[in-house]
Amino acid sequence: MPRRWNNWCTAVLHRRRYQKDESFYTVSWACNIDGTPFLVAGGLNGIIRVIDTGSEKIYKSFVGHGDSINEIKTQPLKPSLVLSASKDESVRLWNIHTGICILIFAGSGGHRNEVLSVDFHPSDIYRIASCGMDNTVKIWSMKEFWTYVEKSFTWTDLPSKFPTKYVQFPVFIASVHTNYVDCNRWIGDFILSKSVDSELVLWEPRMKEQSPGEGTVDILQKYPVPECDIWFIKFSYDFHLKTVAIGNREGKIYVWEVQSNPPILIAKLTHAESKSTIRLTAMSYDGSTILSCCDDGTIWRWDVVASS
């Protein structure tokens, strides 16, 4: 049965400026090892700000990237670890408790242009996926380097003295798209990704265990998103990976059921006053609430209306 949605445009209740010439592109929730909630933000200046939401003060600032930061993601199984994807063609793994840059994913087998998106595998703690302006999605493994991750939690010397390791070769490289790939997310062992061709693509990487970097791709499904032909539009899904929400350049949101075959469009969310490009959506735990951030500075909230 189709779901009905209510909507409204939200107002900013509180604002805090941490640096005059900064423009934040990405933000992610994380927490310290004692459970203290942090907001981790990055953007134009390439500096990662870890903000203590209780005191509203900066807990730590991470300097390392050579250019702007396009996305930050938190490890769901170890939420004091975060990944950052940068215009400097690298992905970095950070420990927000100790302030250490643990691993740098870049080099001979790395991206050849801006990295636009990165994601942790939901259950395999060693595996991540990244994508960018070189039109590729790369899957990386941290298994060989996990001792450095463990060491970062007990490091007592200066963070700058930590033996940060370079991970130069991914375990898989996929050319699913022919243009910029600006968002990729794990759906179990599958990957959902998008480019600028007005669709989401769900695919399965088939890796060759004996030949790192090689393998094949099985395209499983495609989810059309009309008028989504510009880059830096990112999608989101609920905790149980059942539904995905993505905006377009006309201010509309498409909500797809991910696990059905053929794909089912659950809803197309529109409002007369929502006409600006939607750059990002965020979906609640159960998928009943969707937030969207627009180019005109507005944030919209959509809620499922219970059937009477």
Image (cartoon, helix red, strand yellow):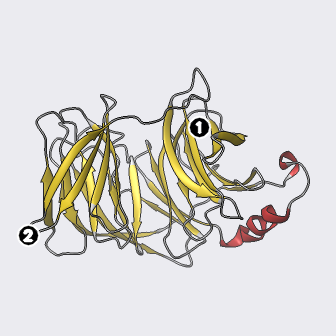
| Disc 2: CA contacts within 10 A as few (<14), some (14-19) or many (>=20) | few
Q: Position of residue 37 (x, y in %)?
A: 61, 56
Label 2 sits on residue? 308
Q: Position of residue 244 (x, y in %)?
A: 28, 61
Quadrant containing the N terminus in the rendered view: bottom left
Q: Under tag 2, what secondary structure?
A: loop
Q: CA distance from mark 2 to mark 1?
A: 52 Å
Q: Nearer the viewer, mark 2 or mark 1?
A: 2
Query: What label does residue 88 carry, if any?
Result: 1
- Residue type highlighted by circle 1: Asp
Which quadrant of the view contains residue 146? Answer: bottom right
Q: Under tag 1, what secondary structure?
A: loop
Residue found 23% across the figure and 32% down from its top: 276
Q: Count the marks.
A: 2
* Picture layout, residue 149 above or below residue 168: below
Foreground pick, 75 / 13: 13
Residue found 20% across the figure and 47% down from its top: 7
Label 2 vs 1, first from the N-terminus:
1
